[in-house]
Structure formats: C-alpha cells, structure tokens
Amino acid sequence: MTAALHLDAVGALMRRALNELLRVPGAAIPGVLAPSLFMLGLTGAFGELTELRGFETDSFLSFILPVSLVQGATFAGAATGVNLARDIEIGWFDRLLAAPTPRPALLAGIVLSASLRSLLPITGVLVLGLALGANWPGLGGLVVAVGLAFAFAAVAASWTVGLALRFKTQAAAPLMQASMFVAVLFTTSYAPQEVLTGWLATVARYNPVTRIVEGVRQGFVGEVTWAETWPALAVLVVLLVLMAAFALRGLRHAGD
Amino acid sequence: MTQASVGQSLRVVGALARRSIDQTFRRPQFLAPILLFPTLLLAINVGGAGRAVDLPAFPDVGGFLDFQLAASTLQATMLAAVSGGVALALDFELGFNDRLLAAPIPRVAIIAGRLAGTATMGAVAAVWFLVLGLVFGAEIVGGPAGALMVIALSALSAAAFGGLGAALAVRSGQASVVQGTFPLAFVILFLSSAFFPQELMQEPASTAAAYNPLSFIVEGLREPVLYGISGETILEGLGGIAVVGVVGVVATALAMRARLRAA
C-alpha cells in the first residue's frame, strides 16, 4: 500500500513535468534545437576530419549524431535542475518537502521526468540525422543508443538536482549547463581517441562519459558489440548511483 | 547640439556603460556565457580537431590553436551582445529604462551606453583569448600592433552585434526573447569560416560561409595572429562589421520609435 502511494507520488511529479512541456511547448524548443544545430554545424565545419587516419567512418554526421543524442539527454537533465531551482526560489519545493513522501520518491519523480523529457530531443536529433543521411544503426544499435541516452538523462538530472539543492537559485544554471557541456565534450566527441591531441586525449581516456558516448555511437559507425556495450552500462550504473547519492544528500539537507 | 549638451550626453553614456560592465561582472549568468563557453569550445576544438592541420588542403598556419583564437574571440563578442541585449531587456522589464526615457537625456545615450559596455566586453574577450593563446603556445605574428588590431576589431564587432541585441531588446522588452537567440549565435558562426577554412567546409555550409559577413570579420581577426596585419583583410573585416552595425542601428531606431509610439 505504502509502496503504491510512493509510486503515485513519483507518477504525479512526472506528470507535472510533462504538463509543463504541454503548457509551454516553446520551452522544449531549445532542448531540441541546440543539439540539432550542434550536429549540423559541426558536420558543416569539421566534416573533412574523417579524411584523417583513425576515423572508422567517412560520414562525420554519423560520427557526431550520437554525441548530439547524449547532449540532448543532458540538456533535458540540466533543464530539470534549472526548473527545480525555480521551484525552490518561488517556495513550491518547500511545500513538496512538507508532504509525507519519502525523499527518494521525490528524487525518482524528478529524475524520471527528465529521462522522459529527453525522448523529445533524442527523437528530434535522430530523425533529423537519419533524414540527412547518417548511417542507420540497425534496430539493436538504435535500442542501445536510445536506451543509454535515456538513462544518461537521469544521471544528468541527478547531478543538476544536487546543484539546485545546494545553490537554491537559478543563477546556478550556467554551472549546470557548463558542467554537462564539459562532461560530454571532453570525450571522444569530435574524433576517435587516436586522433585527439594534447590534454584532451588524456582527459577523454579517463572521462567515464567517453564509454557512454562510444556505447551510443557503436551502431552508427560499425557493429554493436557486447565489448562496447558493457563498459557503457557499467559506467552508467556507477554514475547513476553516485549522482543519486549526491542529490539525495542535498534533499536530506533541503529543509535545514 | 551645444558643446555642453554633448559633454552631458557623453557623461550619461559613460555612466550607463560603467553600469553595464558592473552588471556583467557581478552576475555570473551574464559573464559565464561570454568567456566560459567560448573558452571551453576552444579547448575542445583544439584538442578534438587539432590534427586538421595535417589535412593536405589546410592553410599553412602555426597551429590549430592559432587558427581558432579568432573564432573564440568572435564567439565571445556575439555572446557579449546577447548578454547586453538580455540586460537591456531586463531594464525594460524592471522599469529602469522607463525612468531613463522620462529623464532629460538623449534617447540614443541609453542604447549607446549599453553598446559601449558591450564593446568593452568585446575588448576584454580579445585580451582574454590572446593571453590564453600566448600561454598555451600560440604566436601572434603581427606582434603588439597585431594584438591591438585584434582588440580594436573585437570591440567594434561586439558593438555591432550589440546593436542587433539592443534592437531585439527594445522591440520585445523581454529578456527571455533575447536569450532565445543564444543558439542562433552558434548557427550563424557555424555558417562562417570561423572554425574551419571555408574551402574545406562541407556544402551547404561552405557556400553560406562565402557570403556570411562573419567570415570577413573572423578573417580580419585571424590575419594579425596568423600572418601579420594586412590592409585588405582588415578592411574586409571592417566592412563585415559595418554591415552588421548598420542593420543593428536601423533595427534599433525602428524598434525604439515603435516602442515610444506605443507608450
């Protein structure tokens, strides 16, 4: 019975987040537009990079599309953090904290709504990229790519929720956006590991998000393999646990 | 206009420019996009696409960092313009500009003050990226004179783009509308030769870059760093700035007239 009530609370929070999208559809546009523009802009500018030795594909669009999928997911996550900061500023979140709902259920509702919300940019970027000639990743590749990006939105949302609870102001929005920007782009986003130069080559090698980008990318530039998939899944689980713990810590101190 | 009234107007412009700069430095949400995002993108572009200089058709340059500095500077000036527009729109939302419009000062001073602040941010951005470039091994072939040229062009570019931001701010009076142009700044920049040589870009971006005024501006910013000061490229850069500036001034004047008529 109690578990059902908690699930109701999670569902209500998810519905609230989706209602925001339905009532203010314009608010979703930047989340779809930004990764799409990034994908098209980089392809137009850096498309010739595939002539360098080390690229597994001659289609830069296919190489960069997965990065935009992950970016779309992080934008959805960052938007969740900014919206929570707004709710804290206007006092709505205080009322939520006073409700007899466990904090993990509150977090689950907020974070899952981000994952659901991320389906919008993911779909938009995928349709646009494939329409413009990106390689079809196959059904398996598509499921892996969408699934990983969907789950990564929850990681991004947990991180930005933690930041929102810490700073309690929308002024923290640039920090949320910039940190996600760095996490995704300080990877093999532009080029394969062997083509990267200088410090970025080192950072990308140890940045765990690289494994997720590679996992999402595999079907677009080659075959989907378990060897590329399991590291992405493992990193995802570890990041989700760590970020959720960070957000829950913030939630526990939210009423202080 | 008498000499005294010109002096008074300049004092107003100076005061509003100082306020604009103070606002930018006090609020991280204004300053972060101007310097942080272009710096991050510079780092990613250089690390990610640095091997581009190995492409056979890539122009002879000191390094990819040297090539990218102009792109980052131009990007920062555009974002300074967006931030300036957002701040101006906020002044309308909060009623501050209504008080200025009721004050016995020329209306042009309200916009000029904001643009002077934006131009200063453009100069700051140029200094930031030149220093960053030098620290990380870039060479400014044009020397101190070349650096000064980059700073001057960057300030003028920021003021020109600021005119577009101001027009949107005056027309809409809403910060969210001006903020919405943030991605547009990236689109226009990607459709120029800012990040990659135009002859190596893919279609249709390559054709768009050939006619985009931003390509002329960025080449003007790039030339002193890569090869030294060239009169022709600088003039083309100034031409690009003039095109953007004229559109901004006309659009702002029309928007201000419409706002005053509606009031």
Image: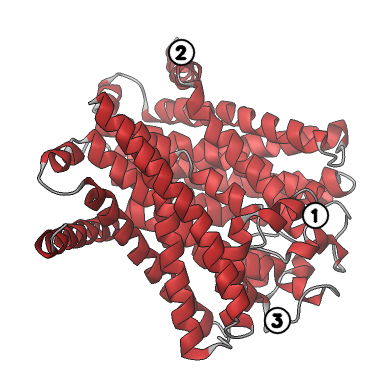
Is A175 situated left or right of B262 in this image? Answer: right
Q: Position of residue A204 (x, y in %)?
A: 65, 64
**Quarter holding residue A58:** bottom right
Q: Chain of mark 2?
A: A
Q: Chain of mark 3?
A: B
C-alpha span from label 2 to label 1: 51 Å
> In the drawing, what numbered circle is on residue B61?
3
- Quadrant assignment for the C terminus of chain B: top left
C-alpha span from label 1 to label 3: 21 Å
Residue nearest the observer in this picture, B83 or A195: B83
Say if B228 sits above or below A187 in the image. Answer: below
> Are discs 2 and 1 both within one chain?
no
N-terminal label among 1 and 3: 3
* Residue corresponding to mark 1: B202
Q: Residue at x 80, y 54 (%)?
A: B202
Q: Position of residue B149 (x, y in %)?
A: 47, 79
Number of residue marks: 3
Is B143 situated left or right of B63 in this image? Answer: left
**Element under disc 3:** loop
Residue B42 visible in the shown view: no
Label 2 neighbour load within 10 Å: few <14, some 14-19, many 20+: some
Q: Residue at x 57, y 85 (%)?
A: B137
> In the drawing, what numbered circle is on residue A197?
none
At label 3, the amino acid type is Val
* Residue corresponding to mark 2: A8
> Are discs 1 and 3 both within one chain?
yes
> Are discs 3 and 2 both within one chain?
no
Residue B247 visible in the shown view: yes
Q: Position of residue B216 (x, y in %)?
A: 61, 64
